[in-house]
Amino acid sequence: MVLRATRYLPYRVLADQIRHYAPARYLCGLTETSWSPDHNTVHDFISLMGEEGARFINEYAVEWAVEEKLADTKVLVADTTAQEATFPYPNEMGLMAAFLTALTAACKKGGAALKEFVSKAATKLASGSEKVRAYRLFAKTKTKAEKDRMTAELAALVEGVQKQLGKALLSAEAGKERLGKYARLATAKVEQLHETMKRLVPQIRYWLKTGFVATDKIISLHIPELYSIVSGKVGKAVEFGLTWGIRRLKGGYLLASVAADRRELVDAQFAVKAVEDHITLFGTAPDAYAYNRGGWSAANLASLKKLGVKHLGLAPEARRSGKSATA
């Protein structure tokens, strides 16, 4: 995992490096054996480790670097950044269309109960596809009221499909243990789609009723963890993806944490939290600390001084009177 992170290698290339490249075998502790993991083994292991496991390994690697004098905990720089996800611009019709398409494909690979469901719901699913096609072909010539009506009609159809799907999943639960590997994966995908739409349909109803986007609006059917990020950039006021908090030690080693929602890691809060996390991991505050102007405030300056930071390099906000918070 560390080798892949430092070189960002595809899994097949990673497996080839571990098998044939001596420094890679040494790093992975495989110099005394002829065994070598294949790309599937490495992929499965990293997937099972998950986000928390990756964070622990990252922290272990950085602590090791500090012990070897490759990184210096006395100097810290922090910032937040947006990781954009690559997917179509989220809109209500697109999300519901993706649900119907993905649901049909997954149910056909599932067990008998799901195959029976997709057979019984074929008429509704086909009707939903027709509504999506009509919306996409004629949306430019329709008024907002007409488009809202078409969206509401599809939402009602999806609610009906959801109701049938809930009953099918209850029936499928009894025979889940007898399913093969791919049928179990398909069933898990259907369950995920069903749970996501439980949250999404009320959000669509709220938007149709009020004209406002619901709090924590789902923007991706397949990755519901994603959220909108108001960046204020020229030409791109809003980005869609995840927010990361990045801490960099002297020596170039990074520690990262991902925000569960768009409100968790904002500059005004992360400017202090970065130092608090640093103290938790290494035991003491950095002597020198830098952050951009998004983290500047009198309260943050006082908090950072209280935590033990001796030399602050926080850029002041624009048009802020007084001297820069640098020392």
Image: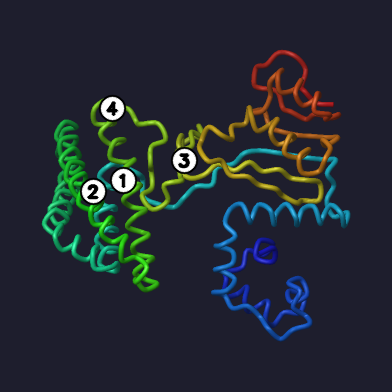
Q: Residue at 48% x, 37% y: name it.
A: 229
Outermost residue on the bottom side: it is 34
Instruction: Judge depth for marks 4 and 1 and give the one in front.
Output: 1
In the rendered image, which residue does mark 3 sit on? 239
Q: Which residue is mark 1?
A: 197
Query: In the figure, is residue 54 to the left or right of 275?
Result: left
Q: Is residue 189 left or right of residue 294?
A: left
Where is 115 relative to 266, above or below? Answer: below
Residue 93, compared with residue 26, is above or below; it is above
> Quadrant location of residue 101?
bottom left
- Asked if labels 3 and 1 touch by Cβ distance under 8 angstroms, the answer is no
The residue to which callout 4 is attached is 211
- Residue type of the residue flagged with mark 4: Gly
State the image coordinates of residue 325 (x, y, percent, origin top left): 77, 23
Q: Disc 2 designates what residue?
A: 162
Q: Position of residue 164 (x, y in %)?
A: 20, 51
